[in-house]
Image (tube, helix red, strand yellow):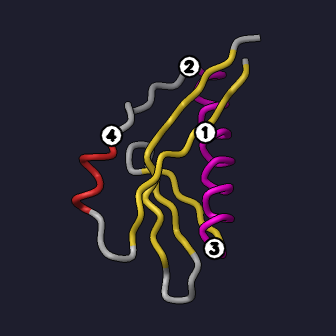
Amino acid sequence: MRKYQFVYPAIFVKDEDGSYQVVFPDLEIFTNGKDLSEAFLSAKDLLSVYFAYAVKYETDFNKPTKLELLLPKCRTNETVMYVDAVVER
């Protein structure tokens, strides 16, 4: 079995109620969480599922944008972090 590791930047947007929306701008996929920890785990799960299908069906996908290019575009309620996923096939 072969392992693939993917690392992509995600933008975590804090809502007024303290919950977070998560956007992977390179992949155009979204998730959320009631707090930052839950949002991060949800983002890892989403990335794993996304790439499990991408690898299985040999789907093309965008390369990750460098963090340095996303940081200047962030607002005060946004945080950018790398999220990783390991996919076995």
- Give residue 42's position: percent from left, percent from top: 66, 57
Distance in Å between CA atoms under marks 2 and 4: 21 Å
Q: Earlier in the sequence, mark 1 or mark 3?
A: 3
Query: Which element is circle 1 on?
Result: helix
Q: Secondary structure at mark 3?
A: loop
Looking at this view, name the residue that lies furthest to the top.
Answer: 1
Q: Is residue 76 above or below residue 66?
A: below
Which circle marks residue 35 in the picture? 3
- Residue for point 52% across, 25% down: 59
Q: Are marks 2 and 4 in contact (CB under 8 Å)?
A: no
Q: Quarter-wise, where is residue 71 in the image?
A: bottom left
Identify residue for label 2.
58
Amino acid tagged 1 = Tyr
Residue occupying image coordinates x 24% and y 47%: 69
The residue located at (53%, 58%) in the rendering is 30
- Viewport quadrant of the C terminus: top right
Spatial CA span between label 4 and label 3: 25 Å
Mark 2 or mark 1: name the one nearer the start of the chain. 1
Residue sitting at the far bottom: 17
Query: Which residue in the structure is indicated by mark 1?
Result: 50
